[in-house]
């Protein structure tokens, strides 16, 4: 193996892909405020749940284990099948975070991907500013 390939392969270690979510019949959405409080509500609309699951399933690949100094997400969701939590999916500036199988994983997210998440969640700039002030 050429010496220059070793660092590239080492950087791929620890990546994780996940299986599709399957049935989700409710989502708890939360938005973190700057003062440490949070606002939340439950989503049960079948059409919106379908869009949320499709978005999360599109993000199944290339996750890395929790970082030592992990950033703090500002918006998150818990996805449920009945009473069983399937996973969490959270968003911060430039990253996604998920909790699967009791462990946290992170990946970089483009502004476009973050905006797509907000669109699926029906969160516009005015709503985010109102709740995060």
Image (cartoon, grey):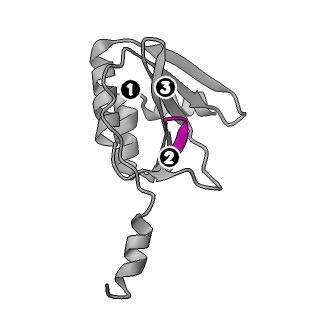
User: Which is nearer the eye, 96 or 123?
Assistant: 96
Number of marks in picture? 3
Instruction: Find residue 39 and name its label.
Output: none
Q: Residues within 10 Å of mark 1 (few under 14, many from 20)?
A: few
Mark 1 vs mark 2, foreground winner is 2
Q: Which mark is residue 122?
A: 1
Q: Is residue 113 above or below residue 40?
A: below
Query: Is the residue under label 1 in contact with that under label 3 (CB below 8 Å)?
Result: no
In the rendering, at what x and y percent does residue 121 appear? 39, 27
Label 1's element? Answer: loop
**Does 30 sit above or below residue 4?**
above
- Asked if the stretch drawn in magenta spans residue 103, the answer is yes
Disc 3 designates what residue? Answer: 78
Residue 63: where, in percent of width, then height? 42, 50
How far apart in space, not on screen, are marks 1 and 2 (Cα)?
24 Å
Q: Earlier in the sequence, mark 1 or mark 2?
A: 2
Q: Is residue 5 above or below residue 130?
A: below
| The furthest residue to the bottom | 3
Q: Quadrant of the C terminus?
A: top right
In front: 18, or 127? 18
Residue designated by label 2:
105
Regarding residue 16, the answer to whether it shows in the image is yes
Q: Quadrant of residue 81?
A: top left
When asked about the image quadrant of residue 58, the answer is top left
Secondary structure at badge 3 equals strand
At x 47%, y 17%, the residue is 84
| Magenta part of the chain | 100-105
Q: Could you tell me residue 117's position as x and y percent?
A: 38, 36
Tell me: 70 left or right of 47. Answer: right
Q: Residue at x 42, y 78 (%)?
A: 7
Q: Residue at x 35, y 47 (%)?
A: 17
In the image, is 17 to the left or to the right of 129?
left
């Amino acid at each position: 193996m050429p010496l220059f390939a070793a660092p590239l392969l080492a950087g791929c270690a620890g990546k994780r892909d996940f299986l599709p979510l399957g049935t989700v019949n409710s989502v708890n959405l939360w938005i973190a405020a700057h003062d440490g409080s949070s606002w939340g509500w439950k989503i049960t609309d079948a059409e919106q749940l379908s869009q949320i699951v499709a978005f999360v399933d599109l993000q199944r690949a290339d996750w890395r284990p929790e970082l030592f100094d992990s950033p703090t997400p500002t918006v998150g969701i818990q996805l449920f099948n009945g009473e069983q939590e399937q996973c969490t999916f959270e968003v911060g500036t430039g990253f996604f975070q998920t909790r699967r199988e009791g462990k946290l994983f992170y990946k970089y997210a483009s502004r476009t991907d973050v905006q797509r998440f907000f669109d699926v969640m029906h969160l516009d700039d005015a709503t985010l500013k109102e709740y995060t002030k």
